[in-house]
Image: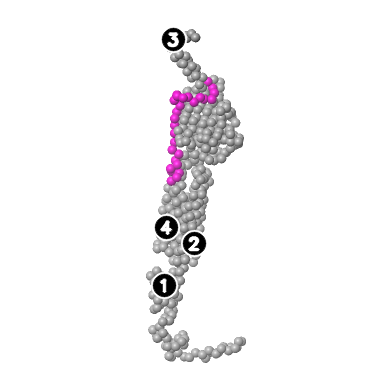
Amino acid sequence: MKVLDTEPWLPSILFLTVFIAGVLATRPASTFIVQGDQKSNLTLSVNVPLDPTNDDLFFHVSAPAGHAWVGFGFGTEMKDALIFVAYPSENGKNVTLSPRIGPYHEEPEHTKAVGVHILEGTFVDNETYNINAHCTSCRSWPLRAAERGKIDVTSTAQPMIYALGPVDSFLHSDSQEASITQHIAYGKLMMDLTTATGEGGVPSLSTTESGVVHGQYPPSGRLTTIVHGVIMAACFVVFFPLGALLTRLPVHHAFWIHVICQCSTILLILVGFTLGIYNSVHNNKHPKLNSPHQGLGLTLILLLIIQPTLGFRGFLYHRKEPQPHSLTLAGKIHRYLGPGIILAGIINGALGLVFANDTDRLPAYFGLFLFIAIIYALTYRIFQRRRVRNNAVNSAAAANFRAGATPATAWAGSAVASRSAYDVPLQSYEDVDRLSHRTSPSLGSFRGGNADVEHAPPVSVNVMPKNEETRMS
């Protein structure tokens, strides 16, 4: 066999030719990789066909399948952005891709002005969304009042947004108009579309860093959300009920302790309320404050501002009338509005967990409420029984009974102080020397509290038969 002699540089030329051909065959792409944890990594790659008459785009998206949906869009924010939302199909084996127009921080609405087609290689399994798609007429889209949104394919910094839906939320639908729940992670990016321009087709992920941008999810405000929830739960489940309970317990200065406790809790509520408003506006989560949780929260804040005023008016009335015959209207409203606010606040806490997509904590939340309620009920019952017992021991009759015989114990209080000015003391049953006989002293004369039984006129009673007059002499 004859071996051909070759120039030493020929193999290098052949290798370089194959490499260049491979590079030219690779469709250009601009890629953005979001580096989160294992459950939130997201890769977005866009291809812009070079044909100037072509108004299409190709893109590739991969994301964890644990999220109910994954979405991305062209625009600086949700308002007026062209958004593509992907979620599992009805059978759970394929992907439904829905083009939508974003209103102002509300659920994006499906649009038929933009066409989208799922391409080969698209699937969803237990771990990953893998989406290859082609959109038509998507470089511009209609908006309100004859306006149009637009993608600048010549821009080196095209604004885009992306988001991931809640985890473990079931959404399987073949409809492009399926309703989606609010995202739990989102972000913004700038895409260089000039590096994505070339031969049209599904973008290829380059093994180099050319055209690849790495990013991270912005702070989600999770810490402030947790602090908001803890403050509100502590106020409505612990502090407010405690302040109400103090007014029903035999505690010294219970009224003023009640005032201090409730007013301090209201101030703490205002701090938690401020954090809640900040979370909604800063995180673009119902910034119009029109969700059920936010609406009920605003109502409770207004009632909490009114509640101390009603209580103070009742206090002024009781100072003028130490023994009023009944509560004033303000006092009655204050008495019954307080428990209503507490109950509504506890319900709103559950709505808050739903609002934050944190329903896994609902059982623990209601368990804490039930535990605190049992503790308060037992405490009230114990003090109530002790109050009844002390009232019996310190009653006027009990004080008269033990006068001169049984001194009041320290825990029972002062027997003398409990006696009324109108009580008639009874003779001690142990003072037998002062009782000469059992004749009633009621008609005799009293000197120094002792009956003069020797000069008391005799009393006789003749009992007549039934229907006859009783005579006394």
Asked whether the residues under the numbered discs 3 and 4 touch, taking CB atoms below 8 Å apart as contact, a structural biologist would say no
Q: Which quadrant would residue 224 be assigned to in this image?
A: top left
Select label 2 or label 1 by which is in front.
Answer: 1
**Residue assigned mark 4:** 259
**Circle on res. 418:** 1
Q: Give the mark nearest the N terminus, 2 or 3.
A: 3
Name which residue type carries label 1. Answer: Ser
Residue 342 within the magenta-colored segment of the rendering? no
Give the residue displayed 39% in from the left and 75% down from the top: 407
- Nearer-N-terminus badge (1/3): 3
Start and end of the magenta stretch?
198-227
Q: Is residue 428 above or below residue 89?
A: below
User: Image quarter for residue 219?
Assistant: top left
Disc 4 secondary structure class? helix
Q: Secondary structure at mark 2?
A: loop
Can residue 235 be seen here? The reply is yes
Residue drawn where x is 44% and y is 49% of the image: 231
Q: Amino acid at mark 2?
A: Thr
Q: Which residue is mark 3?
A: 7
Q: CA distance from mark 2 to mark 3?
A: 111 Å
Mark 4 and mark 2: span between their CA atoms? 19 Å
Q: Residue 290 appears at what percent x and percent y?
A: 52, 43
Give the class, few, some or many, for how many residues have Cα within 10 Å of label 2's Cα (few <14, many ≥20).
Answer: some
* Residue 133 in the figure: left or right of residue 435: right
Q: Are marks 4 and 2 in contact (CB under 8 Å)?
A: no
